[in-house]
Image (cartoon, coloured by chain):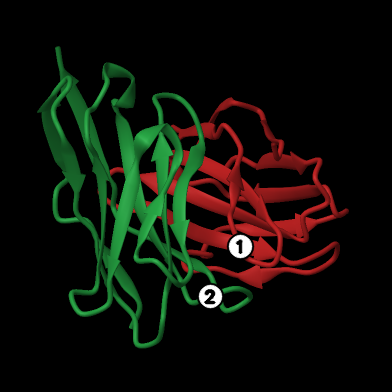
Chain colours: A green, B red
Amino acid sequence: AQSVTQPDARVTVSEGASLQLRCKYSYSGTPYLFWYVQYPRQGLQLLLKYYSGDPVVQGVNGFEAEFSKSNSSFHLRKASVHWSDSAVYFCVLSGGYNQGKLIFGQGTKLSIKP
Amino acid sequence: EAAVTQSPRNKVTVTGGNVTLSCRQTNSHNYMYWYRQDTGHGLRLIHYSYGAGNLQIGDVPDGYKATRTTQEDFFLLLELASPSQTSLYFCASSVNQDTQYFGPGTRLLVL
């Protein structure tokens, strides 16, 4: 069965510090993977996506993620966080282009300490 | 940038009431989706559609109907609302199930 697990419901980091948000997926084939961000009182916006090729993908606002087939992971990283990065981050799995619905993780709420 | 709008943004109704949530996208995307978002569950798919007149059942369809009247418009109907349907509802659209573009959400309270 397809599933996405974000093991950390909440993460707090200091402004300027580095960040990693964890995501583990379960899927028998080659997945399409996304990270979406939800700012307070807004809808979800795409940060980045991975389909194939280079396992490290770059996204908006300095975010990147690394795909690992051996670890079934797709962790999100940022070298230096800003207070405006406070939001909820969702890891999302798809079976592929035209291959099925999106499966959402439960989300990780990121808080930035000044 | 894809544009997805939802109305109303907030709605209060009573148990047994009739509610219609509206979604419009202006980018000619073929796929449209309705999700609900609840604490601890992330987003869960209620219904989706790949074109006018088409409807596909999602993962949590009980108590919901949906209708896609045009390429642009997708409606979610709660004909006998219950308190368990109190939630934040999102509409989204996409081309061929690729990147989804989300609306701002509708907050529904069922008393």
Tell me the number on the disc at residue B98.
1
In-front residue for pair B52/A9: A9
Q: Are marks 1 and 2 in contact (CB under 8 Å)?
A: no
Q: Give the residue type that dot 2 points to.
A: Gly
Q: Position of residue B65 (x, y in %)?
A: 66, 59
Look at the numbered disc 1 and give the secondary structure of its residue. loop
Subunit bearing disc 1: B
Residue found farthest to the front:
A54
Q: Give the residue type that dot 1 points to.
A: Asp
Whether residue A61 can be seen here? yes
Quadrant of the image for the N terminus of chain A? bottom left
**Residue occupying image coordinates x 28% and y 53%:** A106
In the rendered image, which residue does mark 2 sit on? A96
Vertical placement of A2 versus A67: above or below?
A: below
In-front residue for pair B64/A100: A100
Q: Position of residue B87 (x, y in %)?
A: 43, 40
The crowding category of the residue bearing disc 1, from other C-alpha atoms within 10 Å (few below 14, some 14 to 19, many at least 20), is some
